Amino acid sequence: MNFLLQRHRSSRTSIHVTALLTGCMLGTMSFAEDLEHEDSSAKYQITYNQQAHPSFKNGVTSNPVNTLGASADKMYTFSTTAHWGMRTWSGGEVYFNPEIASGVPFSSNLVGLGGFTNGEITRAGGTVPTLYRQRLFLRQTWNQGGGTQQVESDFNQMAGSVDKNRFVLTAGNFSTLDVFDDNAYAKDPRTQFMNWGNWTYSSFDYAADARGFGWGFAGEWYQGDWVLRLGRMTGPKEPNGLAVDFQIGKHYGDQVEIEHAHMMGEHPGKIRVLAWRNKANVASFNDASSYYALNQNKAGFNPQTILQVRNGDKIKYGLGINLEQEIDPTLGFFMRAMKTDGRTETYAFTEADDSFSSGLLIKGERWGRGEDTLGVSWMRNFLSKDRRNYLAKGGISFFIGDGSLDYQPEDIFEGFYSFGLYKNTWLTADYQYINHPAYNASRGPVNVYALRLHAEF
């Protein structure tokens, strides 16, 4: 099998369940990777990620609020997930994902970076493991000819065959990233790169609750080498909140994506163009800056003035391009770049208005280690002029705010080596170098070291 076509999971596609639940269900698991057809499936994963950074330069002299602590620190995440699926009728599939997660971020709060270092931390709410419903959705496929192709058994995907030309509807509780912005080489923080900017665009402010999921629908129309996707998802009641705003006709996130598969020589690749548009009650940075200037000398003034100027529904939008290309069967290249309007605060993802990421993934067959993977990448995140002006005044955004801003783009290098311990179990060493954390040249650089243990059943 070509490296491009090997199995990869979205960070929003895996699920976790406690060791007790996993143990109880082992007797009913489907070991069907080699089957041509499944009518039901039960798959499980467990991941532990420990990260640490030494102390780094802190040149900020004002009173930071949403800032990454400059003293040596460590963090961790733990997750265990179950993916259960069943065929219901012709072309119909239902999936349910219960998950248990725990973890504590750096500085005991998820602040101080645009590109956060661990994709699992969005679902970790403290040291006490928490059980929640991650996904509950229906997938319906209408086949339309053009020949057939085999679908492999995977998380939230049962083995079977589908027509090359088809329409697929996904509806219910899932993540935008389950359908949009796929990439064979940079998508899954449990098996590939860990940084947020490598499993999707940092500036893709896709509608979701605080854990990264929502309710909605997405349609995919496959025709030959082309795929057209469109969908609408719910967002949070308040930016980056856990409570869901179910007024999907009033507040929502829309996205449209066009994908084209191609061959470069004998090597497959794909290009995707994604456009998105949110409508929500969020603050304008210009309004927040004006409020700051008028009220900064008043008693009890709160520099997080975005909280005071959420005064009506606003539109936010962006456009991105995503490329994946096999160079040879053991080496793949990826690139993402996105531009947004940058006028309003973050709705549901992270603090970035424009973003770029690129890198290589190398399989261990090159040196006789077929289960190993080596990855290297570089990311650059940018802030809009409106957001920079607000932060420079001393304003506080949701995840960042050092009390002042000596602006520079946030640059991140990430490299990892994933070592196959035995079947379906990997130990990964990861290093991230973050220059200008939270876009502030007065701080950093930050060196982050990580070990991740991941197993699948």
Image (spheres, rainbow, N blue to C red):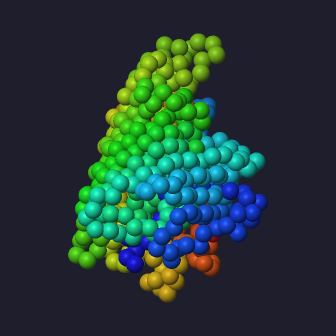
Circle count: 0
- Does residue 59 appear in this view? no
Who is closer to the viewer here, 403 or 17? 17
Q: In the displayed orientation, state which residue is furthest to the left.
A: 265
Report the residue at 53% width, 43% height from top. 173
Determine the residue positioned at 56% across, 58% down. Answer: 85
Residue located 40% across and 67% down the image = 161
Q: Position of residue 211 (x, y in %)?
A: 58, 44
Above or below: residue 305 compared with residue 212: above
Q: In this view of the protein, can residue 403 be seen by the observer? A: yes
Q: Quadrant of residue 329?
A: bottom left
Residue 37: horizontal and vertical position, in percent? 48, 70
User: Residue pushed farthest bottom?
Assistant: 368
Tell me residue 212's x, y (percent): 53, 44
- Vertical comparison of 422 with 78: above or below: below
Classify residue 33 as left or right of residue 123.
left
345 in relation to 122, above or below: above
Residue at 42% x, 56% y is 91
Quadrant, the C terminus: bottom right
Between 377 and 456, the residue placed more toward the observer is 456
Q: Residue furthest front?
A: 89
In the displayed structure, does residue 394 sit left or right of residue 254?
Answer: right
Q: Is residue 331 left or right of residue 24?
A: left
Q: Which quadrant of the figure contains the N terminus?
A: bottom left
- Percent x, y of residue 392: 46, 31
